[in-house]
Amino acid sequence: MKRAIYPGTFDPITFGHIDIVKRASFIFDEIIVAVVKKPFKNELFSYKERLNLVRKVTRGIDRIKVEGFGGLVVDFAVKNDINVIIRGLRMISDFEYEFQMALTNRKLSSYVETIFLMPHADYSYLSSRLVKEIASLGGNLNDFLPKVCIDALNKKIGKRHRNKHNY
């Protein structure tokens, strides 16, 4: 059985992420969408919230499991006897960072390979950071996120704005 891991922060999961998951599901027998517990980013959603959103939006996609992990993704892969990490490449600007990460992961474990998938052109510019910015400025998110993520993001952004102005 060919298995792979698609790791990420997914803060929140976008249509671009979902597109990568769907593309990968045609290549692999099982994909573990691995939500990182403690990213080196300031995430808007808690680990549990991100895990729940990912589970909700991938529910109808065949051969997908959603799990969380902490630590190095290569350690998670080896522990689960998986030797493929899937990474999405949106723009050429992603390549340098992703290439460096893939080579580092290979050095940490020669057992694990990285495969790069490109999202559909409609999502090639899309990032979680961008949708959070659009949401904070009151923009329309329908082309970027599933409804469950839009609702969660608007609720979260609204809370932050209210708290910011309540001294």
Image (cartoon, grey):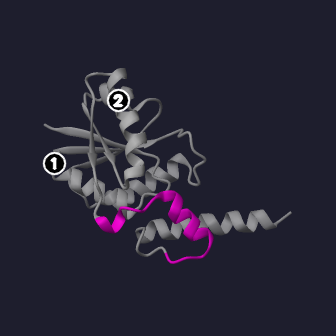
Q: Residue furthest right?
A: 167
Q: Please determine whether, in this image, residue 137 is positioned above or below residue 95.
A: below
Disc ID at residue 27 = 1
The residue depicted at 40 percent of the width and 34 percent of the height is 100
Query: Residue 94 versus residue 127: which sits nearer the camera?
Result: 94
Q: Quadrant of residue 162?
A: bottom right
Q: Is residue 157 magenta?
A: no
Disc ID at residue 103 = 2
Asked whether the viewer can see residue 67, the reply is no
Distance from Cα at disc 2 to Cα at disc 1: 22 Å
The residue depicted at 58 percent of the width and 65 percent of the height is 133
Quick one: SS at disc 2? helix
Q: For the C terminus, which image quadrant?
A: bottom right
Q: Is residue 126 magenta?
A: yes
Q: Please determine whether, in this image, residue 145 is positioned above or below residue 109.
A: below
Disc 1 packing (10 Å; few <14; some 14–19; many ≥20)? few
Expressed as whole percent of the image width and height from the top left, the position of residue 23 reads 22, 55
Residues in magenta, as a range: 121-140
The residue depicted at 61 percent of the width and 63 percent of the height is 156
